[in-house]
Amino acid sequence: MKKLISLFLILMFGLGYGQQKWSLRQCVDYAAQNNLTISQSKIQEQLAENDQRITNNQWLPTVSGHFDNSLTIGTNHPSINKGYQQYGNNLGINSSITIYNGGLLGLNNEKAALNIESQKFQTDKTIDDISLMVVNYYLNVMLNRELLEIAQSNLEISEQQLDRSQKLFDAGRSAKADLVQAEASLAQEKKNVADAKIEVDRALFNLSVLLQLPDYRDFDVETITLPDDLTLPLYDLDQVVNIAYSNQPAVKKASTDLKVAEKDIEIAKTGFKPTISGTYNLGTSYADYFNKGLMTDAWLSQWYDNITNVFGVSVSIPIFEKHNNKLNVEKAQISRSMAENQMEQQKQTIRENVQAAFFDANSTFEAYEAAKESVRSNEISADFAQRSFDAGVLNLYDLNIARNNLIVAKSQLAQSKYNFAFRMKVLDFYAGIPLTVGLE
């Protein structure tokens, strides 16, 4: 009975997975939670947090215990004037604590916190990169679905045209060539539909691979319907650049890494400062002779009588360290220069990306507007060709040319529309607008 219930639950889960259609938000969220590259970055976050806990613990004292045993074989003991054998042991606890080391412990703790922040920004950047890819792949599914609809619509027209040509041929009002042409046109449209279905499946497969799903076969997504009258929002390029400087994780990470480099300089300078340490040792010992004539107290008595407490303070002042401290400071200063350069590189990259997004959005909008005009013109041309064919002044071959031109124009319009939509999402992304806004 339990096996039947388990099998039923497995089947229900499989059916539910197959029937579910993923929204764009679900795809983006799933990628952010399950993508292996993002997961690896989050593991790096955990390592950085663990390093900070280790740094925090450096404020605590160290405590260790010891228990030593020894056997001494001597050649002469003054009390018995002959050789002797002695067994002894000692035990105790040692503790030490850093009182002052030039602020090194505090600086290391601050650096560890900055490293955590830097790694979190790296994770955010990875999530943004993957999310942009998810939006692009998702829109590619929408594009291929629209191309499939165009192909299916043309298939219906070809079927109607073949039916009409068959009736005209049977009535003796058209030549065999027109019927053959209609049959060839229908066969081509069927192939176009089959190819379009494959491209839809391919786009879904590519998206499922990006999401790293265990099985792509039952994967499907919700349809987003983009209007045919998309507009180009007004953006100020300099304003978008400044927003990107403030919001982009890559710039934030570079800024944090610069702070880490500056902290390394302070850490290196502590090598010139003295270190003050405090120590405390608690111990006792026991000894026993194997020779007659050498009497010792019982081991418990000795342990009690031999207890010692030792308190100490030590000061270590660097005088000559083979120039290592000076070189460490110079090395840290070079690292800061590299971090400053990396910061400028990230800003330059962001500036170039925003400019490219701005250019792509404007250029693809122009292409989109031109594609809409091309569709309007070809619709008029195809309608005129259909009327001429119905009037008997145009053959089927020329009619198909006009129809194919319309198909090409509609396909180009769909491609330019989704291309513009994605380019606008990239520009919106740099302007601080979430990727899924306007697509849900």
Image: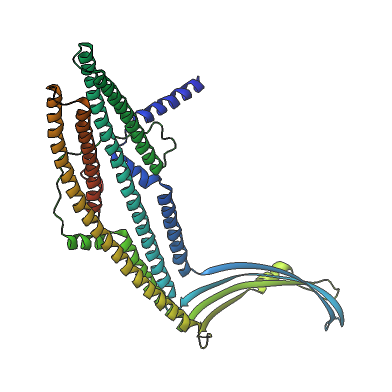
Q: Nearer the viewer, residue 107 or 129?
A: 129
**Horizontal and vertical percent position of residue 65:** 61, 67
> Do we see residue 431 in this rendering?
no
Q: How many marks?
A: 0
Q: Would you say 192 lies left or right of 398 here?
A: right
Q: Nearer the viewer, residue 295 or 380?
A: 380
Write the residue at 21% across / 25% down: 396
| Display coloring | rainbow
**Horizontal and vertical percent position of residue 168:** 20, 15
**Horizontal and vertical percent position of residue 346:** 32, 65
| Residue 45 location, quadrant | bottom left
Write the residue at 36% across / 42% down: 30
**Horizontal and vertical percent position of residue 15:** 39, 26
Which quadrant holds the C terminus? Answer: top left
Compared to residue 244, the image places residue 202 above or below, namely above
Write the residue at 38% across / 64% down: 113
Compared to residue 373, the image places residue 37 above or below, namely below
Compared to residue 11, the image places residue 141 above or below, namely below
| Residue 48 location, quadrant | bottom left
Q: Would you say 332 lies left or right of 310 here?
A: left
